[in-house]
Amino acid sequence: MADRLQKPVLVLNASFEPINICAARRALVLVLKGVASAEEESASAIHSARAAVRLPSVIRLLEYRRIPHQTRALSRKNILMRDRYTCQYCHRTLPSGELTLDHVVPRSRAGESAWENLVACCHHCNNRKGNRTPEEAGMRLARQPRPFSLHTSRHLMRMLGKSDAQWRKYLFY
């Protein structure tokens, strides 16, 4: 059941604009608290002693939320999401636990922990690169690291939406 509660759910503003993705557990709490309504439901349900509740696939906030210029916290999870769980050196897509974060300019050389200097990297490539720049190690980045933007966020929603047909009508392709 824990896996079902982690399934991604598309979050729409009251205007039906896609604004976020959250876990099914959080979506269910928002619906039960009366903050959101389920626009689409998945086939799976959770059961209590007296009832069964279908898990939402798409929820819509009941009150419009003004979304400020979208910035995301610098975190391991957000870097991995931005880089689509793909090593930026060998291009392999891996589970979160098999990826590390690499400082493109090593910290020992005043490389900052910033969006523009961190990339998803597999253990093998991180060890191979070591305390060098990609050029010194003879390695090339798949793409230059950039901050998480609204474009990145929408792209992730579209990618996740490919596996959930219920999302497609809310994401403009």
Image (cartoon, helix red, strand yellow):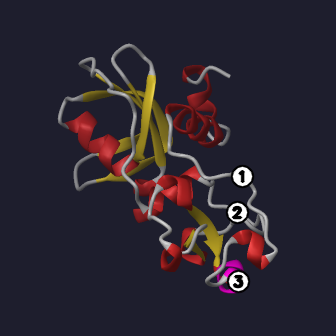
* Residue 143 numbered mark, or none: 1
Badge 2 local density, few (<14 within 10 Å), some, or many (20+)? many
Q: Which of marks 1 and 3 is in front?
A: 1
Residue 94 place in picture, x, y as percent = 67, 68
- For the record, the magenta segment spans 125-129
Say left or right for 101 vs 29: right
Q: Does the segment drawn in magenta span residue 81?
A: no
Q: Name the residue under label 2.
A: 88
What SS does tag 3 mark?
helix
User: In terms of secondary structure, what is the magenta stretch mainly?
Assistant: helix
Q: Residue 124 carries which label?
A: 3
At a point 32% along the width and 53% down the height, the residue shown is: 47
Q: Quadrant of the N terminus?
A: bottom left
Helix, strand or loop for disc 1:
loop
Q: Mark 2 or mark 3: which comes first in sequence?
A: 2
Q: In this view, does 108 lie above or below 152?
A: below
Above/below status of 16 relative to 59: above
Distance from the alpha carbon under mark 1 to that under mark 3: 19 Å
The kind of residue on which mark 1 rests is Arg
Q: What residue type is labelled 3?
A: His
Q: Determine whether the residue tagged by mark 2 lies in a helix, strand or loop.
A: loop
